[in-house]
Image (cartoon, grey):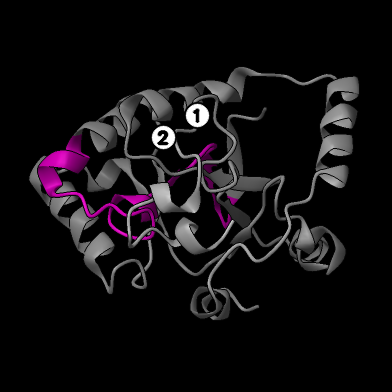
Amino acid sequence: MVHTLPFKDITVPSLGFGAMGLSFGLGSNLSLEEAEPVLMKAIELGCTFWDTAVVYGAGINEKLLGDFIKKHNVRDKLFIATIDAVQAEYSAFETLHEQDGLIATARELGVAYVAYSPLGHGWLVDDFQYKSPDDFAPNDFRRTSQGMIAIPGTTKVKRLEENWASRDIELTAEEKQEIRKLIDVAKPVGNRYSSANQALVGH
């Protein structure tokens, strides 16, 4: 996997860090003190392309990152993603944009495609701890739903280190073909989000 990618007129590290789950969507709303270990580890690793949005908890996520940046005086070490890219879900569970032309158009226009939830909202990890939707926190959206810069998000240092280490994995053509076969035949059934959340992502 490549370790850097062009983004507008600069180069950014790949993978990026999706900050949404620190305060929105996954049943968590971490304090600054709770979020600091994973954010400090991201900087230590060089994982400094961070993604946030005002919709993540009505600005709570951006405030959390801003407070962290001020406290540790690290603004010069980070690139905070803004609207200079297309951001859409892309994972083994969501390949819609391969067919609808979004990925091809972004590539053709030289626009960065920031792929959120590349691990299928946490479903594609080795020790996924949830057995049914009832196991999620009441405010976790997964309760009701099942050339890119991937921005896997996490609140755990260990997961961040695993995500960052994935940059050094090189898949063979045969492995990629096998993964593609699995993706094409193992599509989830039903909506990934509740109706309200589907509307937020343009579906």
Q: Which residue is found at the position 44% from the left and 62% from the top?
A: 141
Is residue 162 within the magenta segment?
A: no
Task: State the image coordinates of residue 19 (x, y, percent, origin top left).
Answer: 36, 51
What is the quadrant of the C terminus in the image? bottom right
Q: CA distance from mark 1 to mark 2?
A: 10 Å
Per the rendering, the mark at residue 163 is 1
Q: Nearer the viewer, residue 201 or 14?
A: 201
What is the span of residues highlighted in magenta in the rendered image?
A: 7-36
Amino acid type, label 1: Asn
Q: Residues within 10 Å of mark 2 (few under 14, many from 20)?
A: many
Residue 50 visible somewhere in the drawing: no
Is residue 8 within the magenta segment?
A: yes
Image quadrant assignment for residue 199: bottom right
Residue 11 versus residue 126 in the image, above or below: below
Q: Residues within 10 Å of mark 1 (few under 14, many from 20)?
A: many
Q: Which residue is found at the position 91% from the left and 21% from the top?
A: 174
Residue 96 versus residue 200 in the image, above or below: above
Image quadrant assignment for residue 106: bottom right
* Location of mark 2 (residue): 47
Q: Are marks 1 and 2 in contact (CB under 8 Å)?
A: yes
Q: Does label 1 or label 2 sit earlier along the sequence?
A: 2
Task: State the image coordinates of residue 166 (x, y, percent, origin top left).
Answer: 58, 24
Q: Nearer the viewer, residue 99 or 111?
A: 99
Left or right of residue 27: residue 193: right
Q: Which residue is found at the position 26% from the left and 62% from the top?
A: 62
Residue 90 versus residue 48 in the image, above or below: below
At numbered mark 2, what does the secondary structure look like: helix, strand or loop? loop
Left or right of residue 175: residue 155: left
Task: State the image coordinates of residue 42 (x, y, percent, origin top left).
Answer: 34, 33
